[in-house]
Image (cartoon, rainbow, N blue to C red):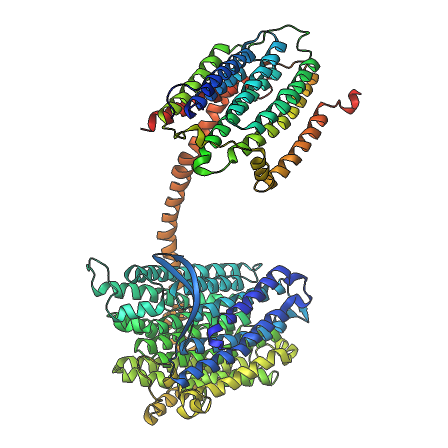
Amino acid sequence: MIWADHAWILPAIPALAFLVLFAFGRFLPRGGDFISVGAALAVFVLFFFVLESHLDWLGAGLGGIRNVGTDWINFDSFIVRLGFTVDSIAIVMVFVVSTVALMVNLYSTNYLRHQGKPEPRYWWYFAVLSLFVAAMLTLVLADNLLLMFVAWEGVGLCSFLLIGFYYERRSAVEAAKKAFITTRLGDVGLFIGIILFWRATGSFQISDIIAAAEAGRVNDLPQVMGDGYLTLSTLMLFLGAAGKSAQVPFHVWLPDAMEGPTPVSALIHAATMVVAGVYLVARMLPVFEVAPGASNVVLVVGLTTALLAGIMALAQNDIKRVLAYSTVSQLGFMFVALGVGAVGIAMFHLLTHAFFKACLFLGAGSVIHMTGEQDARKLGGLWWRMPVTASTFIISAIALAGIPPLSGFFSKDEIFVATIGGANTLVALLLGVAAFLSALYMARLVFITFFGPPKDLAVIKRTREAPPTILIPLVFLTVLTFLVGFLAFDQVGAALGFPGGIGNYVYFPEPHDFHFSNSIAAVTGTISLFGVLTAWWFFWGRNSHRAKAVREFQPRLAAAVENKFYFDEAYQWGIDRAILPLARMVAWFDRMIVNDTGINAPADATRYVAYWLRYHVTGRIPDYALLMVIGIALAGGLAFLLRG
Amino acid sequence: MPPLDHILIVNAILFAIGVMGVLTRRNAVLILLSVELMLNAVSLNMVAFAVYGQVEFGNITGIVFAFFIIVIAAAEVALALGIVVRTFRNRATANVDEVNLLKW
Amino acid sequence: MEDGVTATQVVFWILAVVMLVSAIGVVTAGNIVYAALFFIAALAGVAGIYLILTVEFLALVQLLIYGSAVVILILFALMLTRARERPQALFGRTRPLGIAASLGLLAALIGGIVATTWTTPATSSAIQSVGLQTIGDAIFTIWIVPFIIVGVLLSIALDGAIMLASPDEDEI
């Protein structure tokens, strides 16, 4: 059996699990969580079969891309395929999704319990989790934009449902709505982009669109816009990607999305769904390269996001929010890599980031679960109460900070190499600042959470190390965090059966070897170390007066950072001043013109006439029969006259 | 054999007479008789089409249809007479224009 | 079409006139029993036309079911409703309108028939008699399911008629 030709099985399994859980979950023992875990495990195992057959083709020189599927919608001129693509990008994504999904499923079986008792809607959580995995796998395997869009909305829906999982809490409801609506703004752009591409090429197939773009056939028919049409369509796609991946100016939803259960943050809002935007751009990268200016937009947005989110993360005190801003910032790094055309490196950073960020979130979840507190200012000194959690968290944080030899170092270093290779020193410099910020905020978070004197002795006293179902995913992901970084090396990749390092596996347009440049590595390593040292200088336990001094030195700037540069306030102002008045006008028009005049008026007239007429009805059957015959005779006569 | 359109015209007249009976009579049983006339006109039409069409189409569907119409008519008469008897017992009349409950 | 008027056509027109006159009698007779008798005559006329159209089977069924069973049912109903015991107007108030409407319908029908070009077989020999066996084959092979359904329908209708006509329990 050629597994890659049956890749549809991967999303089908969790979809089936969702159906079972949706229908019977609440009646099953343990809320049916074993079905969800089992589905994730099956996907994880089957992934390796798919990988193996994919590598077989690569080895046999059959090309790295396999399309299979059937027609979903087929009118003569409008064909949408229900097709699946297996290529190296999809393989990376499926690896991330299946691994993290399995870990999160396992972790949630304990996290969603209090003193061993399942929380309310425990079964529903796992049902939606399975649905999410199904939608996410469909998204990464889809071979056409329309199917991808359906899955794209599917993961958005699951994100909405899971952020609002604790819907008794008003903030969770608000956060869910905010996430949904904000990403929806981008999705509108994505859909417009899909339609624009379809209009120009008559196809939704990604391969067709890329071929058409490279042949210069993507333009509006009268040729008014010239290349502008291609750029516009491409940027519309990027709008969707930016919304999903929380890039500036859409980044506001991701930190609020932390209202959901922490494993959800790890799976959806760190490792998989938010990287869907990166994935989309990576998949469509040939188009971005052809469209004039598109890559630069990606680069600028990514860089801005990496910097801004890095700064905002500095002033956050909620553990999960720091991690959320860090996610936004790292996604910015990936977009920078895509902006300079290094798809393999972007996917590499996506891969490493998925593991250490999932691990960080799960570690934060472990802290929150065991202490009941997620404000880092009230924690501190936790490391000797929960050594396993602390060590996995610290290792992942070091990886994120980019200190060798952990995975984050390699992927970030690769991004630097690619950026400098893209001959843009300014970008590389700014990226260096962002990398410095990553090290700084991660070290700060670790210092104030796990070290220093405990701020609240009661919290420390009741804290114990988490149970094994929580620790196993942590340790597993930490091991992966150690290991995946070495995939950059050709020798490691070749030993595992890949054609070489990640650059020789995921690439566009040409495979390239891993450029390990000692000087750049030394610089990036130093930047990261310097970030950690700076954090130690300002935030380590007894040094915190220095951070306070900085805040007091520039109170306005500090307030701006703490308020996330007033993005939310600005949006709220815009909504209050522009959108709500417009909505009121539309609502007024709808109520007064459409509803009262357009719909109710004929109804009222009918009712009035009927009220008046009913006193003139005899109720005698012969009268009705007579009228009926007259009507038939008239209709017959009319038909006879009109027959020509 | 008479031409087809002659038969059709005869049937049309028969049908119109039936309609006239339905519209002018008061007594429910007489109305029923008129409806039967209409049904006969229709089934005669079917048979005429079937017989005249069979050379070209080779089917006898119209004849079978007429047969079914006769059977249905028998069922319908039985039911309708039941209703008439019922109405007569409840309202002491078999005249349809004295039954005027079909209004507000 | 054959030239001249054949004997079949003469017979057809005689039967047609008898049938139509009887039908007019049904709808205009001043006596209910006369109306029922006219009805039998009209049915016999229809059966005769079936014979002319060479469908003996239908003519037979027409006489057996319509001419006897249905008419007897109707006569029963007339007696049960004591229609004769209370002499009263047999026509409704809207009689002129009804006549006008039916004439309008007739005009529309005849207009349609005349305006259409009907394909009539060239010779009468082209028309083959529809034998009993052909009809039987058709009913019991192609139309077997409708035949069964109509049988069930008939028995249900008879049950329903009995239910309707039987007195309520408190009336007994």
Q: Residue at x 66, y 69 (%)?
A: A114
Return the x and y of residue C39 as percentages of the image width and height.
Answer: 58, 15
Is there any visible trace of residue A570 in the rendered image? no
Is there any visible trace of residue A362 in the rendered image? yes
Within the image, what quadrant is residue A453 found in?
Answer: bottom right
Report the label total.
Answer: 0
Q: Does residue A240 lie above or below A594 as drawn?
A: below
Position of A229 with respect to A471 (left or right) is left
Q: Residue at x 29, y 79 (%)?
A: A427
Q: Nearer the viewer, residue C131 or A559?
A: C131
Q: Does residue A521 lie above or below C112 as drawn?
A: below
Return the x and y of residue B74 as percentages of the image width and height.
Answer: 63, 26
Q: Does residue A312 lie above or below A391 as drawn?
A: above
Return the x and y of residue C65 as percentages of the image width and height.
Answer: 63, 24
Q: Nearer the viewer, residue C14 or A618?
A: C14
Quarter occupied by the C terminus of chain A: top left
Query: Residue extending furthest top?
Result: C87
Return the x and y of residue A607 as percentages of the image width and height.
Answer: 48, 27
Q: Residue at x 42, y 58 (%)?
A: A73
Q: Nearer the viewer, residue C5 or A237?
A: C5
Query: Residue extending furthest right?
Result: C172
Position of A597 with respect to A361 (left or right) is left
Q: Residue at x 54, y 84 (%)?
A: A392
